[in-house]
């Protein structure tokens, strides 16, 4: 092989190697950019989820604080429980926002650790359970109202099981709400950077 053929061969090899290095460099650069975009997207999802969770906890804290305000003149026991059930019925639970949680579900697995997913799921489920309990107590109250307004003997009204069902069931359900509220309010919120 003469010198010019060798030079041409070396030139071709250097050209192919340069092209391959160019493609490799371009691929690595695009991978870094993609990784950075993914990190920024994850951070954005975390931020949105955290803001929604903070808002839910703030609404719950306000709702529960209003419900838990005690009147110093109230008596203890059954009557106090009855008044708390009535107050719970008067208060309308806030409208909890789950839009971010639901709309970003496909990205949640990338943006959050498993424990964080569990915590946020518990938060959203807890908030919805409070609304469900409120609806159950409202249903019991409607049943009790039917008994109160029915054209039956007053003695029968007093002995009717639905007359005291609201209060006893309501007190029990309020205890459940209190536990859920305490647990939801103790959930640590997400850090923005994932730490």
Image (cartoon, helix red, strand yellow):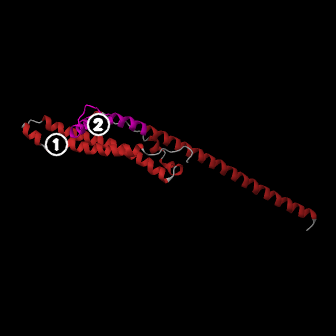
Write the residue at 62% across / 49% down: 35
Q: Which residues are magenta?
A: 57-86
Q: Main secondary structure of the magenta part?
A: helix
Residue 152 appears in the picture as rendered: no
Residue 153: image tag: none
- Is the residue marked by circle 1 packed among few (<14), some (14-19), or many (20+) residues within 10 Å? some
Write the residue at 38% across / 44% down: 182
- Is the residue marked by circle 2 packed among few (<14), some (14-19), or many (20+) residues within 10 Å? many
Q: Which residue is mark 2?
A: 88
Residue 3 on image: x %, y %: 93, 64
Q: Marks 1 and 2: which is nearer the front?
A: 2
Q: Which residue is mark 1?
A: 162
Name which quarter of the figure residue 8 lies in: bottom right
Using residue 183 as the reference point, say whether residue 7 is left or right of it.
right
Taking the view exactly as shown, the residue that stands out farthest to the right is: 3
Quarter of the image containing the N terminus?
A: bottom right
Mark 1 and mark 2 in contact? Answer it, CB < 8 Å. Answer: no
Secondary structure of the residue carrying tag 1 is helix
């Amino acid at each position: 092989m003469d010198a010019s053929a060798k030079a041409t061969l070396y030139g071709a090899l250097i050209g192919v190697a340069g092209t391959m290095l160019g493609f490799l460099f371009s691929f690595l650069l695009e991978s870094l950019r993609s990784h950075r975009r993914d990190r920024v997207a994850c951070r954005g999802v975390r931020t949105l989820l955290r803001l929604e969770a903070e808002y839910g906890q703030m609404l719950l804290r306000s709702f529960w604080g209003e419900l838990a305000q005690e009147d110093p003149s109230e008596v203890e026991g059954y009557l106090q429980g009855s008044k708390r059930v009535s107050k719970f019925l008067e208060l309308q639970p806030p409208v909890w926002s789950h839009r971010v949680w639901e709309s970003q579900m496909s990205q949640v697995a990338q943006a959050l650790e498993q424990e964080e997913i569990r915590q946020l799921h518990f938060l959203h489920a807890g908030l919805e359970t409070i609304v469900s309990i409120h609806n159950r107590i409202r249903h019991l109250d409607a049943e009790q109202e039917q008994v109160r307004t029915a054209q039956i003997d007053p003695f029968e009204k007093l002995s009717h099981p639905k007359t005291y069902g609201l209060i006893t069931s309501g007190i029990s359900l309020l205890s459940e709400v209190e536990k859920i509220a305490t647990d939801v309010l103790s959930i640590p919120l997400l850090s923005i950077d994932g730490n």
